[in-house]
Image (cartoon, helix red, strand yellow):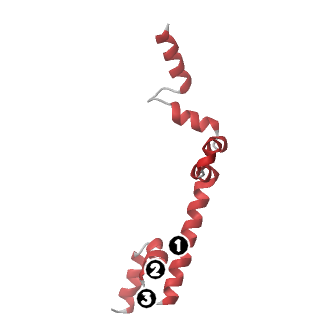
Amino acid sequence: MSDDESANRMRERSALNTFVLYPLLDTDRRYMTTGIVGLIIVALVGVSLVGPAGVALLDSDSVDTAFDVLPVATVTERAHSIGPFTLRETDREIDRYAR
């Protein structure tokens, strides 16, 4: 394989494959260290993206605190929206049919 073909293959790989998957599968220890460091970085980025709400959800004793961390408007809007109706419109519809 020529150097040009090798360079083209490296460009085609995604960053995750280049820095995590392929180095972990390689037998060269220096290259494997790159894979381990890449895996740690991916894990840290994933944890930081999940944030405190995800960490609170993982703790079984404090499931209620996960909803305290999230903005209330976001939780109620997502949990109680039915199709095009918002929470208030849904409550009005329920009140109207209950009468």
Disc 3, SS: loop
Residue type of the residue flagged with mark 2:
Leu
Position of 44 compared to 6: left or right?
Answer: right
- Proximity of marks 2 and 1: CB atoms separated by less than 8 Å: yes
Q: What whole-number distance in Å separates the C-alpha atoms at marks 2 and 1? A: 9 Å
* Along the line of sight, the residue nearer the viewer: 5 or 36: 36
Helix, strand or loop at label 1? It is: helix
How many marks can you see? 3
Q: Residue 51 in the image: x percent, y percent?
A: 62, 54
Which mark identifies residue 39? Answer: 1
Residue 27: numbered disc: 3
Q: Residue furthest left?
A: 1
Number of the label disc, if any, that sits on residue 20: none
Q: Which residue is mark 2?
A: 24
Q: Quadrant of residue 71?
A: top right
Taking 68 as reference, is 42 above or below it? below
What SS does tag 2 mark?
helix
